Image (cartoon, rainbow, N blue to C red):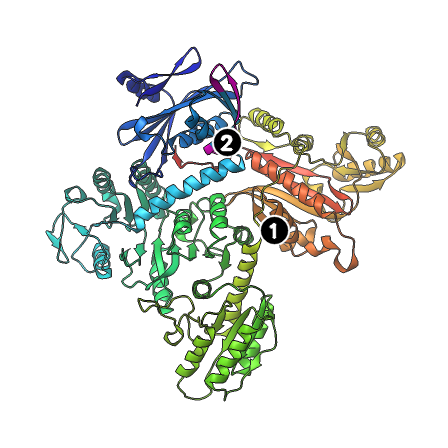
Amino acid sequence: MADVLATDGGAVHLRPITPEDADRLVAFHAKLSERTRYLRYFGPYPTMSQRDLVRFTTVDHHNRVAFVAILGDAIIAVGRYERLLDVGDGKSAEVAFVVADEHQGRGLGPILLEHLAGAAAENGLTMFVAEVLAENRNMVAVFRGAGYQVSRSFEGGVLRLEFAIDPTEALLTVRNARERAAEARSVRNLLSPQSVAVIGASTDDAKVGNAVLRNLLGAGFAGPVFPVNAERRSVRGVRAYSSVRDIPDPVDLAVVAVPAEAIDSVLDDCLAKGVKALVVVSSGFGETGSDGYAKERRLVHAARAHGMRLVGPNALGVANTNPAVQLNATLAPVLPHGGKVGFFCQSGALGIAILDEAARRRIGLSTFVSAGNRADVSGNDLLQYWDTDPETEVVLLYLESFGNPRKFSRIARRVARNKPVVAVKSGRHAVPAALRATGVEIDDTIVHDLFAQAGVVQVGSIAQLFDCAVLFGYQPLPAGPRLAVIGNSSALGLLAVDAARSEGLVAAEPVDLGPQATPEQFAGAVSAAIEDPEVDSVVAVFVPPVAMDPEPYAKALRDAASDSEKPIVTTFLAAEGIPDVLAVRGPDGHPVRGSVPSFPGPERAALALARAWRYAQWRERPVSSVVRPDGIDAERAAALVDSWLEDSGGEGRWLTDFEAAELLACYGVGVARFAEASSEAHAVAAAEKLGYPVAVKATREQWRHRPDLAGVRLDLDTADAVRRAYRDLAEASGDRRLYVQKMATKGFGCVIGVQDDPSFGSLISFGLAGVISGLLGDRAYRVLPLTEDEAGELIDAPKAAPLLAGYRGGPGVNRAALVELLQRISALGDDLPEVRELVCEPVLASASGAELTDSRVRIGPEPSTRLDLGPRRLR
């Protein structure tokens, strides 16, 4: 490397590197606080290997931060910023970096910038400046290519560049694309290994190590398999090695089936060998308690530090049915045939049953991962991989918990734009034992809204999961809700129509062909429905009234459905999945697109079609963006929160009503003007200053928002009325400190809230105020930040929402005002993670606008659920 960063009198310079520089960086690193951020970096050039890990080591100082990028044992790039204390508001920093000549042009510059900007934002900086020689066009391209909006000035052959480091849409797009590429490539190493070692391979048929090796060999894995057993020369006829280090060839994937107590020595061997991915099927880790969890975190830390992906512990394993791979590194003896469905499952025990059910229904899988404790590889990682995998067209998820819900929502929303994502979430009414100690109660309403926001098709059971998989995997999406039901059973036809209408589909009366219908009549009716422009999907009901050969009917149905652009499903003989007689076969003899799915009953067929129609509707919506209204002073709001937190000793507290109003005002959210009064005279003076009519309100918590209005007196328009109200409330509440507030325009009472959910991160909610809505839990939720369309959808989501649109001739509200209010509160919740809870109640929505009369705000330290801020990092 030609250059290294150095400092002289507070300025940043470049000069030739010497061996002492490396020693200085190491010493500086050891003295100051440090964090190591790991990034699996795969550049666009073939010279960068898939196993390459660039490790960014942070050297932190209050006003200086340096990143050292290390590949193997070599320093390949250095970046640094230094705060400009005497310039402007002190929130700018000069930034510079250098990259070794042989590694230039591979994207390291933008990554250094990304890390530096993340560290700068954490330290309160808002602007980077850099001075670049005019002929150095590559450096200018790095800043622009990283997604920054750069302004520049020219003087004396030097370009001065300035750019804000706030995450703009362009910057986030670039960052997310790089993240997707890196994580997808790392998962590809896991699912498409060139060689596999089985550590703990056993000759005992009852042991896990024997089952894994047997399944690997039985699936016909395309590469070499290396059993590792210190006591045997061979296992199942394959030469064994005493340790991974003794294997003469490279090892891409290691499956570990040894007791948890032996994992440290196994890990050391794998790290020394340069294994790319590890699948730990052993138990005895996080599911056993705090000691096991600590052991699990040490395992993950060591694996990530060396660029190794880890599945498990306590995992069932991974599988890839691609003929070029044929990987079955699982405990399941039978895999489904190859197909276009990717499956992620957290539960190891359930995974075997899931694979068996998929095989029974003849649903072809592309890849399968059972993550167990999900210590490293998670559903988010698999979504990144399947997003780029041409062999996967449908994604299935069985989830017990969320690791990073904010990131899940972002990734799933992108993936679902092109590929259906179907998920079943367990733990709605019961929590797995392994999660009880560390898990939290999860509100099913929030889960439902999170999935709906991200375009994920949520189902309630494994059976429904496969019902959707067999439809999405083998038939097109419906273009509309109009359904035709054709069959030879009037009873089943009526059941299908009833089920479809109950799910929101538009179903005409069923076409009953009668029990004596011939195959030709059956095919003709199905073909007519397909050609009908008023039909979007077809359910074909077939139950033979007497013992007869069903194959002619199956052939007729299959031929009629061939090349149809409309989805066709059936209840053929009550079979599940893809019956042989309804399969369209590919070159390998397995069912492919065009095969007709069969359901055991018309209700399940209708439910699957309804979910497909709702998903198709979501996918056709234009992509909406986050809109920040004018008049927001985020800097002042952050300063206020910082000062209040500091006053509380960093513990946090509930803000006073006046502090809450001041904070909301920074985001253009006005609370109806109010004043405190401690006597009748003060109350009258406040009312005259505010202007009549006014309200007088008790201030203690138990008197707020009571449905009997016992703690408030409304529409007071004279001084005498104010005196009487003050006197009555002071006596009833036992508190002489009351509020006098300007009356807001009457309207529908609404509730807007922001909360830090321990499972999902920052959420915004909306509903109508009142005891009935609260009792029934009629609230809708979305993950922050809200896009413009999501703000409108949130208003429409509660069951009572039609009241706001003028239900039964009633007055409607100013919808635009409500949308803007939601956008402002969304911006506040997204900008200020220290706001742990915010409740705006009531918001009075009327034809003239939306006015807030009361709010409660609680602040506290930034929650860990907030983290979705860029490169993977471990502290």
Q: Is residue 842 magenta?
A: no
Q: Position of residue 256 (x, y in %)?
A: 25, 48
Judged left or right of residue 858, residue 556 is left
Q: Position of residue 52 (x, y in %)?
A: 30, 37
Name above or below for residue 410 compared with residue 555.
Answer: above
Disc 1 residue crowd, few under 14, some 14–19, many 20+, Cα 10 Å: many
Q: Disc 1 marks which residue?
A: 780
Disc 2 residue crowd, few under 14, some 14–19, many 20+, Cα 10 Å: many
Res 238 → quadrant: bottom left
Q: Which of the two labelled residues, at mark 2 and mark 1, occupies the earlier sequence position?
A: 2
Q: Position of residue 510 (x, y in %)?
A: 58, 78
Along the line of sight, which residue is nearer the eye, 7 or 791? 7
- Label 2, secondary structure: give it: loop
Along the line of sight, which residue is nearer the eye, 97 or 61? 97
Mark 2 touches mark 1? (CB < 8 Å): no
Amino acid type, label 1: Ala
Q: Which residues are magenta?
A: 145-159
Amino acid type, label 2: Tyr
Q: Disc 2 marks which residue?
A: 148
Along the line of sight, which residue is nearer the eye, 740 or 153? 153
For the residues carrying marks 2 and 1, which lies nearer the camera in this image? 2
- Label 1, secondary structure: give it: strand
